Amino acid sequence: GAGVSQSPRYKVAKRGQDVALRCDPISGHVSLFWYQQALGQGPEFLTYFQNEAQLDKSGLPSDRFFAERPEGSVSTLKIQRTQQEDSAVYLCASSLRRTGGEKLFFGSGTQLSVL
Amino acid sequence: DQQVKQNSPSLSVQEGRISILNCDYTNSMFDYFLWYKKYPAEGPTFLISISSIKDKNEDGRFTVFLNKSAKHLSLHIVPSQPGDSAVYFCAASSAKLVFGQGTRLTINP
C-alpha cells in the first residue's frame, strides 16, 4: 500500500487479556517504530527496529510488552495481561533510512481500550 | 523528564492572521527538529523540519525558526486557513524522535 497500515483500528480488551497489534510499514522502509499516545499527550517512544533487528526497546513500559519484526517488514506489538493503564493509541511509523531521527511516516494507529 | 515541551495546550487564531506555535527543549544533543500535524482519528503527518545548523526553514505558508541558544523553536503559519485547524506536535531527535505534548490550533472564520 501507499502508506503505513495498522490493524485493528480499535481494540477493546478485558483486563488480563492478551492483545496483538499489527503494523504494515511502507514497502522498502528500513526503520520501524512503535509509539504510545495517551489521551491529551504526545506520542511516546516504545521501540525501534532496523530491518528485523530490534535496536532499541528502552521505551517499553514493562515486560508485558513485546514487539517483533521477524522478516524485516510487518511488525507486531503484543501486550500480555493488559491493564487499564495500557489504554492508549498505539502508533506505528516507518522511515526509509537507517537512523531514527529523520521524517517518519505514521499509520492511523490502533486505539486500545482496556476495561 | 519532559525533554520537549509545548506549553500552550491550545491556540485560537482568526483566519488570515498569523499562527505562532512554540516549543522548548532541554537536550542540547538534539540535532534535528520537526513539526507534525494531526487530525482526529489519523496519525501525525510531517509538516516541516529544520536542522540544528540552520536557524530558519520556509515552505510555503509554513516557517520554522530555531534559536539554539534559547533551546526554542517556533512554527509560523501565515496566512492561517480553516484547514490548518489540527493538533501540532513539535519533535526533536538525536537517535530517535521525542515529541512534545501538542498544541491544538483552531482557526476561526
Image (cartoon, coloured by chain):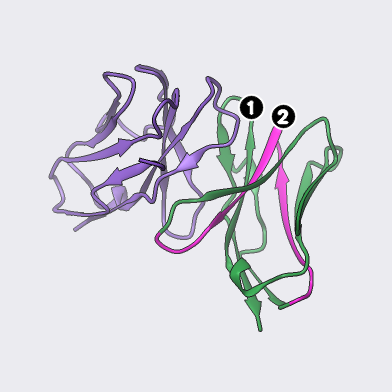
Chain colours: A purple, B green
Tag 1: Cα neighbours inside 10 Å, few (<14), some, or many (≥20)? some
**Horizontal placement of B48 versus A4: left or right?**
right
Look at mark 1 in the image and give the residue it sits on.
B94
Residue at 40 percent across and 46 percent down: it is A107
**Horizontal placement of B57 versus A46: left or right?**
right
Which chain letter goes with mark 2?
Answer: B
> Is A21 in front, or is A72?
A72
Q: Is disc 1 placed on a helix, strand or loop? A: loop
Tag 2: Cα neighbours inside 10 Å, few (<14), some, or many (≥20)? some
Which quarter of the rendered picture does the N terminus of chain A lie within? top left
Q: Is residue B17 shown in magenta?
A: yes
Determine the CA span between mark 1 and mark 2. Answer: 6 Å
Q: Amino acid at mark 2?
A: Asp
Residue at 39 percent across and 18 percent down: it is A51
Look at mark 2 in the image and give the residue it sits on.
B31
Instruction: Give the extent of the magenta segment.
Output: B16-41
Which chain letter goes with mark 1?
Answer: B
Instruction: Residue B42: name its quadrant.
Output: bottom left
Residue A49 percent across, percent down from the top left: 41, 23
**Horizontal placement of B50 versus A111: left or right?**
right
The answer to whether marks 1 and 2 mark residues whose Cβ atoms lie closer than 8 Å is: yes
Residue B64 percent across, percent down from the top left: 77, 49
Residue at 45 percent across and 43 percent down: it is A106
Does residue B80 lie above or below A4 as drawn? below
Instruction: Residue B84: name its quadrant.
Output: bottom right
Residue at 82 percent across and 30 percent down: it is B53
Marks 1 and 2, the one that precedes in the sequence: 2
